[in-house]
Image (cartoon, grey):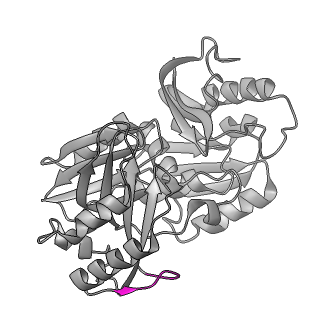
Amino acid sequence: MFRYYGSFIPGLKDFAAGIIRERLDDARIHRLLDGAVLFETACSYDRLNFFCFNNIFAVISVMEDGRGKDGNFPEGHMKAAWGMRSVPDADAVRAESSGKKPRSFRVLCFRENRPAAVDERIRAETELFIARKWGLAVNRSRPDGEFWFLRRSEGFSVFMRRLSRRPSWEKSLHPGELPPPLAWTLCRLAGLEKGGRAADPFCGYGAIPHEALRRFPVAHFYAADSDRAAAAFTKNRLRGIREGSWSVRRAAAGSLHEAAEENTLDAIITDPPWGIYKKTEQPLDELYRSMLRSFAKALKSGGRAVILASRETFEELPGGEGLFEIAGKIPILLSGKKAAIHILRKT
């Protein structure tokens, strides 16, 4: 059995737990936290195929230090690691998605999401332990592997090996662009099914259509944005992915029903402007009113609109009275900002 630690966007713990239980019959969830889950399964990392997690780690050891107490983290956990005669989940620690063993590593320490200071002598001893245990070379600047000591506010710390490999979202995304795990989550909540038709009228740089076309069996996806550069970027991004199953155009959200034809869409998945990264030409409440009227024309009866916006945006369904009912609302924390995933159903 392998133990994993998966991190996700705060607010999605019930969603993440549901995905784990659905995909893994033998899964045992040991800790379900705000923004992370610690679970056990016989499934190896290369077969997990979870797309809702920011990162996945193989857990080597967990140290309890009493709720609310910081103890002597990270040095205490590091010293405890040195005395480990046998390391559970050794195969998962070695495994990469490609099946290749990493050649180099570095050690990182965090308290929640902030770097933690560590005595350099203790760090060096820990690096020596890991190098000998797994036959790796220390490389603090550009390694191809990482070992983390992470302390949670719930009163425990985790020693683990990072398995997922990707650049930092902050460095690789455009301003306002959704990280792929969140885009995938929105598509999943929309209930995209085989043969379905979906749209994103505020596609920006294409995060949502990209995930929908790669991960879900939609028959056609309509993407549009009023910004010429964003629409062109999305079109280039989608080239080579299921050609003929998508279309991208420069257009306002209010013309969605003209592009997709009335009453033909099963789902609309979108992240409309918040007025943060770019000012809108019209007040947000007016924009959302016209948006919902267009959505109601394009969606089939019972179709879903999954919309990422501020938490208060759809409390009164501006302009959507009699057109939609609120089917769900999931508060989340996105880049330090309070947001919510609003799920509307056409009545």
Tell me, yes or no, if residue 232 can be seen here: yes
Camera-side residue of 294 and 137: 137
Picture coordinates of residue 270, whole percent (x, y): 60, 41
Q: Main secondary structure of the magenta part?
A: loop
Asked if residue 265 is positioned above or below residue 111 in the image, the reply reads above
Which quarter of the image is occupied by the N terminus?
bottom left
Tell me, yes or no, if residue 265 can be seen here: no
Asked if residue 288 is positioned above or below residue 49 in the image, the reply reads above
Q: Image check: 220 left or right of 96?
A: right
Choose top left, top right, bottom left or bottom right for residue 149: bottom left
Confirm whether the magenta stretch covers residue 331: no
Camera-side residue of 247 and 316: 316
Q: Image check: 87 left or right of 319?
A: left
Residue at the limit of the structure toward the right, as seen here: 281
Camera-side residue of 277 and 345: 277
Choose top left, top right, bottom left or bottom right for residue 312: top right
Count of marks placed on residues? 0
Confirm whether the magenta stretch covers residue 141: yes
Picture coordinates of residue 267, whole percent (x, y): 51, 37
Picture coordinates of residue 203, whole percent (x, y): 65, 49
Q: Which segment did they paint magenta?
A: 137-143
Q: Image check: 233 left or right of 36?
A: right
Picture coordinates of residue 337, whole percent (x, y): 63, 38
Say which residue appears at 44% left-offset and 62% top-offset: 109
Camera-side residue of 155 and 236: 155
